[in-house]
Image: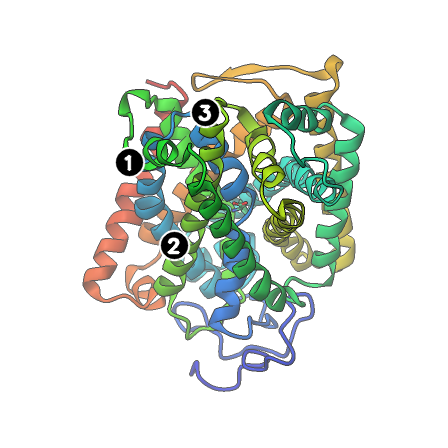
Amino acid sequence: MSDSNDKPNASDPAAPAAPAAPATAMTDDAPVSGAALPGSRASQSLWSSRTAFVLAATGSAVGLGNIWSFPYLAGEHGGGAFVMVYLVCVLLIGLPIMMAEIMLGRAGRGSPVHAMAAMARLHNKQSAWQFVGVMGVITAFIILAFYSVVAGWMLAYAVRMVGGVFEGQLADGVSGIAGRLTDDPERMLAWHTIFMVMTAAVIARGVEHGLERFIRWFMPLLFVLLLGLVIYATTTDGFLKAVNWLLLEPDFSQLTTGSVLAAMGQAFFSLSLGMGAIMMYGAYLPRDTNIPGAAATITVADTLVAILAGLAVFPIVFANGMEPAQGTTLVLQTLPLAFGSMEGGTFIGTLFFALLSIAAWTSAVSLIEPVVAWMVESGRFTRVSATTLASAVIWFLGAMVVLTMAEPDFQFSFEFAGNTESSGLFSVFEVATYKILLPLGGLLIAVFAAWVLSSDAVRKELGLSDNLFFLWRSLAGLLAPLAVLIILLGGLNAF
Ligand code: PHE
């Protein structure tokens, strides 16, 4: 079977392939061994180009993880040392696992549950490996439940920005405005609902429908705006202190096992790894794409956005005498201060929060796509009914998040890995996914790709030379699983 002939939709930019609407049979798209895959979704359609895939996967990776949670976690865990651990995790654990996920998706051609099962079967291994895909589906539900609530904050802020409420405000005024949102269950619920409806609307139509063109213009714009914010930050007197604190003078005495676990979890979360989102997008990837190159591009772009966000936020923190450890509302308390005092800040701020909402939207879509694809594959749901059901469950979980965060009667806090977590179900979900499910999912995916499948087929599918394959396998098969295991167990205080 050849890979080069007759790729329906793959080369027709005028008709982007919608995963929702299966194209004609992809008989040339064989999995690793080249044999036809039993039970495979032969009708899978593809991204129109490599760029389309890289854009969509970057759209998945870049989101609240970069601009909301990276600065807030760096702030809580002491800055530089956290960032160093984060960068090491991205490079040595994240990048190899991202290659594994793309490879598995492309060879397995289907939802992560299906792809894992198909690959296991193809290599004569236990189909129980599909459980990793199921775990990813569960993880997606939990993440999206709180992700949607935070995305709702960003939507709310885009609207507040239009009204110019931050003009001339000082730190106290700005935190007051943030508090009025995050203490108000009804408002949060309303924004959460709007965000879920937006996400469901895209998913019901099929991921690639329009997503590609959309991401093509908004991502560069978000990047330019962030860069502009960093340039603005250089004019404040907190800039040097922020650069030193965030990047140049890591204070390793601040590092605890809990913060190493947080940095590793953040790396998985930010790169969308460990639950099958990237695997799912890989399933729509044409066979001739260079996987390592695509993975490296996505990783670099994602990391750059996170660092820029840090360089935009922390100068404001230091210039205004604020504490870096403000918690989840750090971004809401800092960036509006900058917008409130800069020329044209109302316009730029509106644009910024609107773009951030869009970035969250494209990530949310990638979270729910594996769930919906799996439901549709089962043959029991149409795309619309699967989307409706999954979104309704996630909406309900999100409503519980809101309730236990803002309704005094329902609030609770707990201790985990040396940190006090005080936002109710929000914290439970955040801890369960960032610190347990994503690293565990990533570990299993890495072991599966590096040890369970036959290495020759994997090397070919990744398109690596012998030496590079050896390097990849040492990282994905050895270093990453060991590091994840040690950090996970250390963070859980197992030893
Ligand atoms: N990477 C996304 C972000 O940084 C979140 C995400 C996590 C998306 C896991 C998909 C899967 O916002």
- Crowd class of label 2 (few under 14; some 14 to 19; many from 20; radius 10 Å): some
- The quadrant of the rendering that contains the C terminus is top left
**Circles 2 and 3: CB atoms closer than 8 Å:** no
Residue 76: mark: 3
**Residue 254 visible to an observer of this rendering:** yes
Position in image of residue 405 (x %, y %): 68, 23
Q: CA distance from mark 1 to mark 3?
A: 17 Å
Q: Work out whether mark 1 precedes mark 3 in sequence or the reverse, and give the earlier one.
A: 3
Q: Amino acid at mark 1?
A: Leu
Q: Residue at x 49, y 75 (%)?
A: 29
- Crowd class of label 1 (few under 14; some 14 to 19; many from 20; radius 10 Å): some
- The quadrant of the rendering that contains the N terminus is bottom left
Decide: is 267 above or below 355.
above
Q: Residue at x 41, y 75 (%)?
A: 288
Q: Is residue 287 left or right of residue 460?
A: right
Q: Secondary structure at mark 1?
A: helix
Q: Work out whether mark 2 precedes mark 3 in sequence or the reverse, and give the earlier one.
A: 3
Decide: is 423 above or below 113.
above
Decide: is 43 above or below 54.
below
Q: Work out whether mark 2 precedes mark 1 in sequence or the reverse, and give the earlier one.
A: 1
Q: Quadrant of residue 150?
A: top right
Q: Amino acid at mark 2?
A: Val
Q: Amino acid at mark 3?
A: Glu
Residue 248: mark: 1
The one nearer the camera, 147 or 464, is 147
Q: CA distance from mark 2 to mark 1?
A: 19 Å
Task: Name the residue tied to disc 2.
Answer: 300
Position in image of residue 334 (x %, y %): 55, 33
